[in-house]
Image (cartoon, grey):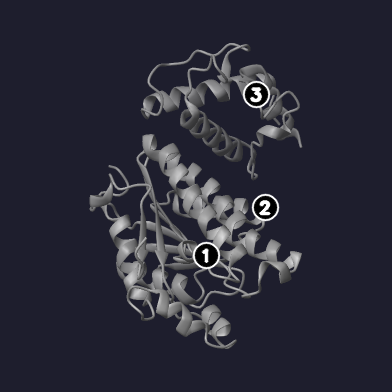
Amino acid sequence: MLDQNSAFAMLQDSLDSLVRTGTIDQPIKIQPTTQLLGPESSLDSMGFVTFITDIEDRLEAKLNKECYLVLNEISQFDINSPNLTVDVLARYIVKLAGD
Amino acid sequence: MKLNEPNSAHQVAVITGASRGLGKSLALYFLNKDYVVAGCSRGEGTIEHKNYHHYKVDVGNEAEVRSWVRNVKNAFKKVNLLICNAGLVRSALLLSMTPSDEMESIVRTNYIGVFYVLREISKVMALRGAGRIITISSTMTLLHEEGTAVYSATKAAVTETTKVLAKELAPRGITCNVIAPAMMWTDSSEALSKGGDWQKRMLDKQIFPRIIQAEEICHIADFFASPKSSAITGQVIYIGMVA
């Protein structure tokens, strides 16, 4: 199981690790409203893909089961106007962990 | 150290359709070059080698591909080279006579399967910031030959997808290229040629009217996989035909 705070921490840890590995240039300090995907996001497209892949790895290690983040499973996600905030992603991760 | 530098320990190659034909030849070639090869096919593996690992996967099944790639990633921690080889060469029916299930089967294996594998493996490569991707297309896309409407369309789609992916993945140090051979002698083409003069007609259209050997394709794959090819991406090499 995973709660919202743990999910937030996981997202922050992942972003920090992507800075360390040079995948993204600038540190990102997340807030619930921080955009991870969309016009205000600091991540470029491949940065976002790498971030999601890293989150899947972390979830799998933590939960000891295969986890796939599928964006169109998120009710608020509109594939024609891609936009994702930390809060929405964290809620989805908590739900995924509980399934 | 970047993965494709020459002194890395065992490089890991993932090859689809590795149990026979070109896929098997590619697997043996890269095993001989000291790669670890994770091959897949819908059936059992046919290669006995200490560095060969076979997985039974239907590449047209999204869940199977996801799970397989996750298993490969957990087992080997990296993928240096992907060769999307699995494909169907079936029927030479005119479009007007092609049953829907035949069309869907070819599209699922030749394009949708390639899409699933590219999507999942590219994420593994993106995370490590290096990799080589090779897809297998066909010179059929140049010929517009009767009876190949579905097959050629899937191969053209593979070529275009690979070029787009080359642009998307370039910032992560990953190259994507296409090998498009003319007629090869495989179980599938052998079956097709039983229908008449198909083989002769195809060879007559080639610039070198002879069967393309698997070794020739391995040579091109080796070129694309080389550390010295790090700036070569989005390219198509046609073998046996002038594009």
Identify the subunit bearing mark 1. B
Q: Amino acid at mark 2?
A: Ala
For disc 3, the marked residue is A81
The answer to whether the residues at label 1 and label 3 have Cβ atoms under 8 Å apart is: no
Q: Residues within 10 Å of mark 1 (few under 14, many from 20)?
A: few
Assign the N terminus of chain B to one quadrant of the image: top left
Image coordinates of residue A90 in percent, x first then y, are 66, 23
Residue B163 picture location, percent across and down = 44, 46
Q: Is residue B51 left or right of residue B112?
A: left
- Badge 2 marks a residue whose secondary structure is helix
Amino acid at dot 1: His
Q: Chain of mark 2?
A: B
Q: Quadrant of residue B153?
A: bottom right
Residue A96, placed above or below residue B97? above
The answer to whether any part of residue A80 appears in the image is yes
Chain ID, mark 3: A
Name the residue located 48 percent from the left edge and 17 percent from the top edge.
Answer: A42
CA distance separating discs 2 and 1: 34 Å
Residue A88 point in image, percent of width and height: 68, 21
Residue under label 1, please give it: B144
Q: Nearer the viewer, residue B103 or B71?
A: B103
Label 3 Cα neighbours within 10 Å, binned few <14 / some 14-19 / many ≥20: few
Residue type at mark 3 is Ser
* Residue assigned mark 2: B63
Same chain assignment for discs 2 and 3? no
- Helix, strand, or loop for circle 1? loop
Q: Element at badge 3?
A: loop
Establish if B126 lies above or below B135.
above
